Image (cartoon, grey):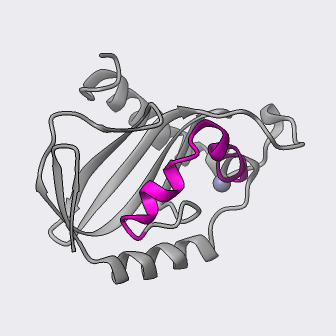
Amino acid sequence: MILNIDDWKFDINLEDTQAHSSFSASRHCTCAYCENYYRGVRYVSPNLKGFLADFGIDIEGPVEMYPFEPTICLVAYRVTGKILEYGKDAIMVDHIPVLPKPEDTNNFKLEVGELQLPWVMLEDPEEVVSPANEPEFLERMYEKLFERRSGDFFICS
Ligand SMILES: [Zn+2]
């Protein structure tokens, strides 16, 4: 299926993306950072869910989640398909950048964010127990953060 959004053009396999995404959603992480994203994102972006659904993505089925701070995160979703034409800039959904990035010949990712969320959970955000607080993950997350702050074209513009 061909999908045109702004100056981007995609060829996506909707069924495959839906199957993979709903599987991810069925076993997604339930830590407070992730739950806060699923519950809080509707307040900052009422349109993101529908935007992702056009690709076959369930908003609760990310493949990566980076809570750089408890309320600032970057979320990546996987799409089965190809980026046929690259746009000049990230796609903006309710002022949130969504950047398509190729992964391999059959898949690409949509990186959503960074976005700032309200904290809607009862837990103290500073005391969350999460795989995101494990040392190996923190290292990967800081690498990601550094890569974005130093290289990405849309973050500081
Ligand atoms: Zn989590």
Q: Residue furthest left?
A: 85
Image quadrant in which the C terminus is located: top left
Which residue corresponds to the image point at 27% horizontal and 49% vertical from the top-left?
100
Q: Residue furthest right?
A: 122
Q: Going by the image, does 94 lie left or right of 116?
A: left
Q: How many marks?
A: 0
Residue 129 location (% of width, % of height): 78, 48
Q: In the figure, 97 relative to 25: above or below?
A: above
Which residue corresponds to the image point at 67% horizontal and 39% vertical from the top-left?
43
Magenta stretch? 35-56
Residue 45, image quadrant = top right
Q: Residue furthest top?
A: 157
Q: In the figure, 39 relative to 77: above or below?
A: above
Image quadrant in which the N terminus is located: bottom left
Which residue corresponds to the image point at 72% horizontal and 50% vertical from the top-left?
39
Which residue corresponds to the image point at 52% horizontal and 67% vertical from the top-left?
58
Quadrant of the image where one finds ligand 1:
bottom right
Q: In the figure, 110 relative to 80: above or below?
A: above
Q: Going by the image, does 29 lie left or right of 79?
A: right
Residue 29, image quadrant = bottom right
Name the foreground residue: 142 vs 18. Answer: 18
Name the foreground residue: 6 vs 11. Answer: 6
Residue 140 location (% of width, % of height): 45, 43
Residue 149 location (% of width, % of height): 36, 23
Magenta stretch: helix, strand or loop mostly: helix
Q: Going by the image, does 10 lie left or right of 128?
A: left
Q: Going by the image, does 147 lie left or right of 121?
A: left
Magenta span contains residue 52: yes
Magenta span contains residue 47: yes
